[in-house]
Image (cartoon, helix red, strand yellow):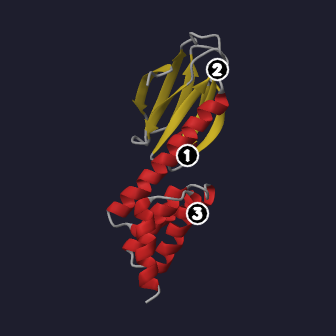
Amino acid sequence: MKHLLHIILLSIVLSCSQQVVRVEALQEGVEVHVDRQGTREKLGVAPWQGAQSEFFRGSDSVTIHFFKDGFKPSSIVIPNIVYSSNISLKADLKKEEAAASFNSAEFSSKERIESIVSNALVAQNLTATGKFDQARTELSKLITAYPSIAVFHDLLGNVFYLQGNTRSALTHYREAEQLSPGKFERINMIKRLEEVVNQ
């Protein structure tokens, strides 16, 4: 996918006295947003400056988003790897080729979907590496936020099954089947677990 914004990472200057993040843009009126672990917050309009500790708030990385009507939105990921450095960013937005103006709700939906998929993949990876309690926590958060998505119930059913918790696994597989009926593998798993539970 073509990036909608050209970002120039101007400098990461080592400094023990101040830990500052400065975000600028060549155009006036550019909105600056930050995503920290899936939660978006508007920082303000460029230029923006703030303490690095407040900017990252304990996150391993953040995603900076730039928006301005008539210009292409984009984002950049900033890792939190050098705690004793100042970070300066300067954005150069490109005009939209089409006359259509930016739809921030559409961009937010795309970002939200990417965040949801990313969290599901994290949970699946935790399950594959045997970190069942962490996977269960991640999946429970997803189910709380999106209770009608069957795959989250399937994944949580898998975690409970691998932990030997047949009844909880069966509960989540049944919930998934109600939300999205007809998945052959799930139907077979429900039948097998019902046999175990009814013995």
Q: Quadrant of the N terminus?
A: top left
At horizontal 45% and vertical 35% (from top left) the residue drawn is: 78
Q: Position of residue 165 (x, y in %)?
A: 44, 79
Query: Is residue 141 placed above or below 32 in the rendered structure?
Result: below
Query: Is residue 106 placed above or below 186 in the rendered structure?
Result: above
Between the C-alphas of marks 3 and 2, the distance is: 43 Å
Is the residue under label 2 in contact with that under label 3 (CB below 8 Å)?
Answer: no
Which secondary structure, mark 3?
Answer: helix
Mark 2 or mark 1: which comes first in sequence? 1
Residue 68 is tagged as 2
Which secondary structure, mark 1?
Answer: loop
Q: Quadrant of residue 142?
A: bottom right
Q: Quadrant of the C terminus?
A: bottom left
Which is nearer the eye, 6 or 150?
Answer: 150
Is the residue under label 1 in contact with that under label 2 (CB below 8 Å)?
Answer: no
Q: Position of residue 128 (x, y in %)?
A: 33, 61
User: Is any part of residue 42 visible from this angle?
Assistant: yes
Query: Is residue 137 placed above or below 95 in the rendered structure?
Result: below
Q: Quadrant of residue 72?
A: top right
At horizontal 61% and vertical 61% (from top left) the residue drawn is: 144
The amino acid type, in three-letter code, at marker 3 is Gln
Which is nearer the eye, 23 or 169?
Answer: 169
Mark 3 or mark 2: which comes first in sequence? 2
Residue 178 is tagged as 3
Q: Alpha-carbon neighbours of circle 3 within 10 Å: few (<14), some, or many (≥20)?
A: few
Q: Is 101 left or right of 197, judged from the image as shown?
A: right
Which secondary structure, mark 2?
Answer: loop
At horizontal 64% and vertical 21% (from top left) the residue drawn is: 102
User: Is any part of residue 133 visible from this angle?
Assistant: no
Q: Position of residue 100 (x, y in %)?
A: 65, 15
Q: Alpha-carbon neighbours of circle 2 within 10 Å: few (<14), some, or many (≥20)?
A: many
Q: Which residue is mark 1?
A: 38
